[in-house]
Image: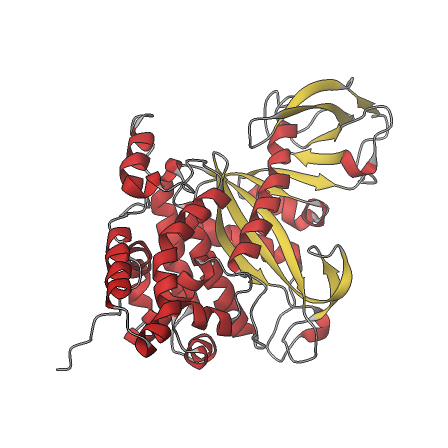
């Protein structure tokens, strides 16, 4: 019987994380290419094209392309492992789920499901590809959950069934519930808030939600009922960095107060500027006048943070044309994204652990690496990524210098790089094992 050789090691913390996905890949070369792509996406390179990633990690460009386009492995199985890791890290804690679509421009006529449509990344209509995304937040930490490729009616292929963005979003939420996630609140913009099927299905599933609606949103009332509004109330909109600004909230009551409630939030109750005034609909119970604004406000910075993370990891940098390969690429991006998110102290311990345990574990996990002048204890996603990139630098430098060292051997430099990489490999990340 032929023994399967072990995968070629890279950086210990990356290898340990990627080992969770080993069962997805029956070929060790495919697992090595998966690890290389995760490593390259996390590395500090501006563009995450396959030629650039191959150069960064001393891989083969064509082999990486074959891995994405033709290799035998299942994106669904990869997603299942990632969601299992996420669920285990949450340890039963409920999460807030934000629904949004993201679109990126794509030129040419060969990429599947590209059509002229509104793209959030450029804020206007032009040819591009769009996906609907569900991502979570736990105590100001964002993490990816799932995505679905939006297929415009003009691009449907034989066997395709057209689904609107709200329908795709509902499918994602139901998949998460079936996978065992505990959803606390769903946040979404007007595309979803104005879709009756989306809102009613959330209600049937017993989920709380805060969604944006248009200012012209209509509500059925009985003939003798009237519309009334509460006085404007000031509240402090608290941002993720701890700062705050004053906002104003007003409730609109259509007839008698029902389970569905309507609020208007603005920065200026007199002029109500369109760019900073929001109409909201929610089924949150109780006295929520002072909390609904902060709850929906989370969506703005979550959405911004998610876009920032995708830009850092190369969400739109693929040079692929078929939908299956593009979805594989996106799933790899989410695997890399999750690794960074899991470095947050909130995931270092279970809910039953003491409040002081995360800080102790962070210090012990960083070890001597925490003494690097560029290392930061800031808990933001970008700073956690920057810390990880510090740990990847010696390996990346060794990959870039290896061709030169073969031409012009420098034993002391080679030995020094090996010692530095061995030191880096003593670092252990925070994700649960």
State how many labels appear: 0
Q: Residue furthest left?
A: 1
Nearest the eye: 207 or 308 = 308
Q: Quadrant of residue 81?
A: bottom left
Q: Quadrant of residue 260?
A: top right
Residue 370 visible in rendering: yes
Q: Position of residue 329 (x, y in %)?
A: 50, 67
Residue 339 visible in rendering: no
Q: Position of residue 62 (x, y in %)?
A: 45, 81
Tell me if residue 241 comes above or below residue 180 in the rendering: above
Position of the N terminus by quadrant: bottom left
Q: Which residue is drawn at the image coordinates 83% and 33% (left, top)?
A: 273
Q: Which residue is drawn at the image coordinates 62% and 70% (left, top)?
A: 161
Q: Position of residue 133 (x, y in %)?
A: 57, 54
Q: Which residue is drawn at the image coordinates 28% and 69% (left, top)?
A: 410
Nearest the eye: 183 or 394 = 394
Colour style of the rendered protein structure: secondary structure
Relative to 363, is 200 on the left or the right? Answer: right
């Amino acid at each position: 019987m032929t023994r399967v050789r072990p995968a070629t090691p890279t950086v210990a913390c990356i290898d340990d994380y990627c080992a969770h996905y080993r069962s997805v890949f029956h070929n060790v070369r495919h697992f090595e290419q998966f690890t290389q792509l995760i490593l390259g996406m996390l590395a500090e390179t501006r563009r995450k094209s396959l030629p650039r990633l191959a150069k960064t990690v001393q891989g083969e460009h064509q082999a990486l392309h074959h891995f994405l386009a033709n290799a035998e492995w299942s994106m669904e199985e990869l997603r299942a492992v990632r969601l299992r890791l996420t669920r285990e890290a949450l340890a039963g804690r409920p999460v807030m789920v934000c629904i949004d679509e993201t679109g990126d421009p794509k030129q040419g006529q060969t990429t599947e499901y590209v059509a002229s449509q509104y793209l959030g990344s450029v804020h206007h209509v032009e040819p591009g590809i769009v996906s609907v995304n569900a991502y979570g937040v736990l105590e100001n930490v964002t993490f990816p959950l799932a995505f679905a490729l939006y297929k415009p009616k003009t691009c449907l292929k034989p066997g395709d069934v057209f689904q609107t963005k709200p329908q795709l979003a509902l499918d994602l939420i139901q998949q998460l519930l079936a996978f065992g996630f505990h959803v606390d609140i769903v946040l979404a913009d007007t595309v979803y808030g104005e879709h009756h099927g989306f809102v009613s299905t959330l209600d049937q599933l017993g989920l709380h939600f805060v969604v944006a609606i248009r200012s012209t949103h209509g509500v059925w009332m009985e003939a003798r009922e009237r519309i009334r509004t509460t006085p404007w109330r000031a509240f402090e909109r608290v941002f993720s960095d701890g700062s705050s600004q004053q906002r104003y909230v007003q409730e609109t009551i259509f007839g008698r107060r029902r389970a569905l409630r309507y609020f208007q939030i603005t920065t200026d109750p007199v002029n109500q500027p369109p760019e900073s005034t929001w109409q909201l609909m929610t089924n949150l119970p109780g006295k929520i006048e002072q909390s609904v604004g902060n709850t929906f406000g989370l969506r703005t910075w979550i959405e911004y943070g998610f876009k920032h993370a995708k830009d850092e990891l190369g969400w739109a940098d693929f040079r692929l044309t078929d939908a299956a390969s593009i979805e594989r690429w996106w799933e790899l991006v989410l695997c890399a994204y999750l690794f960074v998110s899991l470095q947050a102290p909130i995931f270092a311990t279970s809910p039953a652990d003491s409040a002081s345990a995360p800080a102790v574990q962070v210090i012990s996990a960083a070890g001597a690496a925490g003494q690097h002048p560029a290392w930061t204890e800031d808990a933001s996603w970008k700073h956690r990524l920057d810390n990880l990139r510090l740990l990847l630098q010696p390996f990346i430098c060794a990959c870039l210098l290896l061709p030169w060292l073969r031409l012009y051997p420098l034993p002391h430099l080679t030995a020094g790089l090996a010692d530095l990489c061995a030191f880096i490999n003593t670092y252990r990340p925070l994700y649960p094992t």
